Image (cartoon, rainbow, N blue to C red):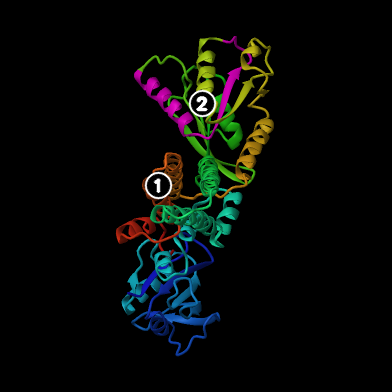
């Protein structure tokens, strides 16, 4: 393989930038760059770095990882130079002039996978760990680097292979006496597997916000205080506030940290019967924001009577009640009450969002913490989610066929379930699928 190089740290100003080199010629190229005859493996060596014209580039720390004791299982050299884009790029450019090639996105991790240092689940955990938006997700992903998801896959696969072996015996040696309780035991295992897979899938689907950032939509009719709430949560005037209904014509999205979670909070256009085409588009985007959010804050105005526009909001809440976490907020409670609170039931909180939103923040944090602390594995990618869902569906189909005595078709679906669950941690047969997956990684990883 080519010897590859890339800057492994993010762009910008910092005290240190790391340039990473991997491949059969990594040590020789490091010698050229550092003018060092020897580099002791796993020892930090302070060295001057020189370009091909013998001009001094920088003084840096050089660390040599001798194969196979490195991330990629190849010879790897890391140069810890002074931060900033100029020096790191000079080091990278010199390595390329000496004979290295610029690494493709994710190529270091791809080589680690191909050389058996990590499996696919660990590779995806690395990518997700870089992007994660919460402390809890970082902890879960670190456990996956230690093989938690891989061990789960192996456990499911072993049970399925055991089931398949029983059935193959029944197909090939039907005239032999087999244990009478075999079918019952197989059904028990299938029921257990389908339960575990479904629980893992649904829990992971609920917790995707741990990695991507949970999305919170603020909805309500015009002038209930949605923009005021956003501004108070952000501690600055992000949204325009006006007594004129329909001032917010589009969704406004900002990031905000609540406890240990980084969330995306969306101020939506007031939901009502639109008066023009632009407002209609804004309201359509408000509905879309609800669809895309894990949590919905529905606001109502304490100083106004309940009306048809409020009824529309409550109908929307009923539509999404089983899919979203919903917080009903009665705002402007410092003003005389006109709103008929019976429409809200008992599960609402009272607020003056221009003065104090701590009660709401506490409620949001409780929801986020409860979601984060579910005691199940976290699937980190759409690919993993699809694999678990496919395995689950094949197991359910196999269960029906077993009851009907269709053992050949039963074995076919069990085999498909084995292939689906195994794909989470094992290699694909087609190289282009691997290329596509690892291309989503950042340079230097």
Which residue is depicted at the point 38% across and 76% down? 23
Q: Quadrant of the C terminus?
A: bottom left
Q: Which residues are magenta?
A: 277-306
Residue 407 has which mark? Answer: 1
CB atoms of marks 2 and 1 within 8 Å: no
Figure check: 370 above or below 150: above
Label 2 vs label 1, nearer the camera: 1
Residues packed near mark 1 inside 10 Å, few (<14), some (14 to 19) or many (20 plus): some
Q: Where is residue 287, by image quadrant?
A: top left
Q: Which of 49/401 is in front? A: 401
Per the image, label 2 sits on a secondary structure element best described as helix
Q: Is residue 440 left or right of residue 209?
A: left
Figure check: 30 above or below 253: below
Q: Which of 96/151 is in front? A: 151
Which residue is depicted at the point 62% across and 47% down? 375
Inspect this view and state whether residue 121 appears.
Answer: yes
Q: Is residue 293 magenta?
A: yes
Q: Looking at the image, which residue sits at the far bottom? A: 37
Q: Is residue 163 left or right of residue 279?
A: right
Q: Where is residue 426, by image quadrant?
A: bottom left
User: How far, Cα to Cα, is label 2 from label 1?
Assistant: 41 Å
Residue 320 has which mark? Answer: 2
């Amino acid at each position: 393989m080519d010897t590859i190089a890339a800057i492994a740290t993010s762009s910008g100003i910092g005290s240190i930038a790391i340039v990473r080199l991997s491949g059969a010629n990594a040590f020789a190229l490091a010698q050229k760059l550092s003018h060092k005859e020897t580099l002791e493996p796993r020892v930090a060596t302070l060295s001057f770095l020189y370009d091909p014209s013998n001009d001094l580039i920088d003084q840096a720390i050089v660390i040599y990882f001798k194969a196979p004791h490195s991330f990629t299982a190849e010879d790897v050299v890391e140069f810890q130079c002074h931060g900033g884009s100029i020096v790191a790029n000079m080091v990278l450019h010199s390595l390329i002039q000496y004979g290295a090639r610029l690494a493709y996105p994710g190529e270091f991790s791809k080589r680690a996978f191909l050389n058996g240092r990590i499996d696919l689940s660990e590779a995806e955990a690395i990518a997700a760990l870089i992007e994660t938006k919460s402390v809890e997700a970082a902890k879960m992903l670190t456990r996956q680097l230690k093989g938690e998801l891989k061990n789960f896959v192996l456990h499911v696969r072993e049970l399925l292979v055991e089931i398949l072996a029983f059935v193959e015996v029944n197909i090939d040696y039907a005239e032999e006496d087999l244990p009478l309780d075999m079918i019952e035991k197989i059904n028990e295992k299938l029921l257990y597997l389908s339960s575990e897979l479904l629980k893992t899938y649904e829990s992971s689907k609920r917790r995707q916000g741990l990695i991507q950032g949970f999305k919170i939509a603020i909805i309500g009719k015009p002038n209930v205080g949605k923009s005021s709430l956003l501004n108070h949560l952000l501690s600055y005037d992000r949204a325009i506030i006006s007594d004129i209904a329909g001032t917010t014509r589009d969704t406004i999205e900002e990031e905000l940290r609540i406890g240990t979670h980084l969330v995306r909070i969306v101020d939506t256009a007031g939901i009502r019967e639109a008066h023009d085409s632009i407002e209609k588009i804004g309201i359509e985007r408000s509905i879309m924001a609800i669809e895309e959010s894990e949590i919905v804050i529905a606001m109502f105005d304490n100083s106004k009577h309940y009306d048809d526009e409020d009824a529309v909001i409550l109908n929307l809440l009923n539509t999404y009640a089983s899919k979203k976490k919903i917080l009903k907020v009665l705002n402007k409670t410092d003003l005389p009450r006109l709103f008929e609170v019976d429409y809200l039931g008992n599960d609402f909180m009272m607020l003056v969002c221009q003065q104090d939103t701590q009660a709401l923040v506490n409620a949001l944090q409780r929801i986020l913490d409860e979601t984060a602390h579910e005691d199940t594995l976290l699937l980190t990618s759409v690919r993993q989610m699809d694999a678990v869902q496919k395995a689950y569906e094949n197991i359910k189909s196999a269960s029906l066929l077993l009851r009907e005595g269709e053992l050949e078709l039963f074995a076919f679906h069990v085999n498909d379930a084995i292939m689906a669950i195994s794909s989470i941690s094992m290699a694909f047969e087609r190289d282009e699928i691997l290329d596509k997956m690892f291309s989503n990684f950042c340079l230097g990883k």
